Amino acid sequence: MSQEPLKLYGRSAEDMQVISAFLQDAVAQLGDMAYLADEQRFVVLVNRFCWEVEAAPMRVRSALQLANVTSIRQKKLNLTRREGVVALLAVGFEPQTLPGGEISLQFAGGGEIRLAVEACEAILEDITAPWAAASRPYHEANEEFDE
């Protein structure tokens, strides 16, 4: 199955919601994340689940580049443990003093990376051809609360 490679640009909180939807359930090795302080850039290579393909489950290697990064904080992640694998749940942008704010990457198990940015600027781009995935990620629906 052939599909056009995905290439998305994000410059607002709304754009980042779209990027987040395409990145839900992406998996990455911690060693495939890098903060390039001299370039003010944070880069993550992931195996992205192709939610846009309705037929057989597929994954594709993708790169997420986040620009204008002035600092990085992390919680429950050790980026020096390069072989560790994490599942990305969501990416978001919280505006503060526009155009600046904070970009967050939230991972399964409570891990999080927060990037202070001078302006929201993101690129998500597929960098390989897709391949067949073993399965489709599954999430249980939220249960109604008992009153």
Image: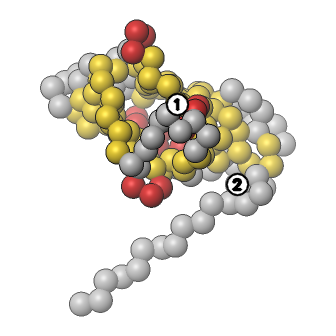
User: Does 1 sit left or right of 114 as displayed?
Assistant: right
Q: Counting residues from the N terminus, which is met first, the one under dot 2 or under dot 1?
A: 1
Q: Residue at x 80, y 49 (%)?
A: 132
Of badges 2 and 1, nearer the viewer stands 1
**Relative horizontal placement of residue 13, taking residue 32 as reference (left or right):** left
Amino acid at circle 2: Glu
- Residue 55 lies, in percent from the top left, at 76, 55
Q: Residues within 10 Å of mark 1 (few under 14, many from 20)?
A: some
Residue 60 x/y as whole percent: 70, 39
Kindly identify the residue that appears in the image at 74 percent across and 29 percent down: 128
Q: Is residue 114 left or right of residue 19?
A: left
Q: Is residue 133 visible?
A: yes
In this rendering, the answer to whether 124 lies above or below 51 is above
Question: Of helix, strand and loop, which one carries label 1?
Answer: strand
Q: Is residue 92 visible?
A: no
Name the residue furthest right: 1
> Where does label 2 land, which residue?
54
Instruction: Give the colour scheme shown.
Output: secondary structure
| Residue at the extreme top of the image, as rendered | 38
